[in-house]
Image (tube, rainbow, N blue to C red):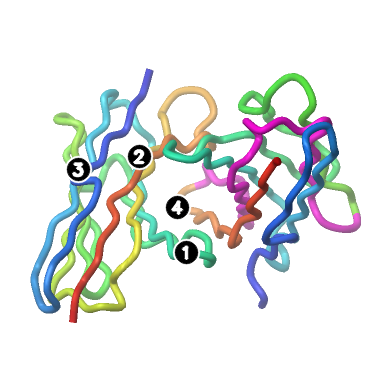
Amino acid sequence: KQEVTQIPAALSVPEGENLVLNCSFTDSAIYNLQWFRQDPGKGLTSLLLIQSSQREQTSGRLNASLDKSSGRSTLYIAASQPGDSATYLCAVSPNAGNNRKLIWGLGTSLAVNP
Amino acid sequence: NAGVMQNPRHLVRRRGQEARLRCSPMKGHSHVYWYRQLPEEGLKFMVYLQKENIIDESGMPKERFSAEFPKEGPSILRIQQVVRGDSAAYFCASSLRDFTSGANVLTFGAGSRLTVL
């Protein structure tokens, strides 16, 4: 059974710091992995999607890496800003059966302090 | 493009009442997915629908829950005889094509938060 774990559960950093959020999954047979951002009252926003054949994806100050064999992904945020404060969720699509059943971690709650 | 619209944003029901949650997908999207986020738990897949068809409802409780996506109008998630354990945030997402087709991205709504008293 696929399980997704995110560490740390919460993180508070001063503005400008580079930071890393971690996601681990127990079954390496994944179709893809996504990082989402959840803002209170604003739903979920897809940040980066990494296909199982890829090693990383970049968008602006965000970089996500994927090491399928070790069951790990990291989300790197460069030069953090207060506007980055949100909950960051990692979700995997299983490779077998229904790929639409995203399996989610509990998220990392990030606070970037000015 | 208004994105995925969910309503109501907040719904309060007493035990035994019915809850109806609506989701209007993004314009042009014909694939809709419902997820539930229970307090202190991660999101869980509930059901996947295309227009007029339920494709996969394996994540939905067998009793009291139903979903539809009619030819005209929004997708509706219906919960009959609600209990306190149904209190959660219910998120709807839509995609242009089957989400498994390449890197097709899901677009999520803001969620509907159900509170059962």
Q: Element at badge 3?
A: strand
Q: Which mark is residue A7?
A: 3
Q: Are marks 2 and 4 in contact (CB under 8 Å)?
A: no
Residue B113 in magenta stretch? no
Gap in Å between the C-alphas at discs 3 and 1?
Answer: 20 Å
Q: Are marks 2 and 4 on the same chain?
A: no
Instruction: Give the residue pinned by disc 1.
Output: A40
Q: Kindly indicate the quadrant of the structure image that contains residue A66.
A: top left
**A75 and A84: which is toward the camera:** A84
**B72 and B76: which is toward the camera:** B76
Residue B77 in magenta stretch? yes
Instruction: Give the residue pinned by disc 4.
Output: B103
Picture coordinates of residue A71, whole percent (x, y): 20, 32
Instruction: Give the residue pinned by disc 2.
Output: A105
Q: Chain of mark 3?
A: A
The residue lying at 52 percent from left, 67 percent from top is A42
Gap in Å between the C-alphas at discs 4 and 1?
Answer: 26 Å
Q: Element at badge 2?
A: loop
Q: Element at badge 1?
A: loop
Numbered disc in front, either 2 or 1: 1
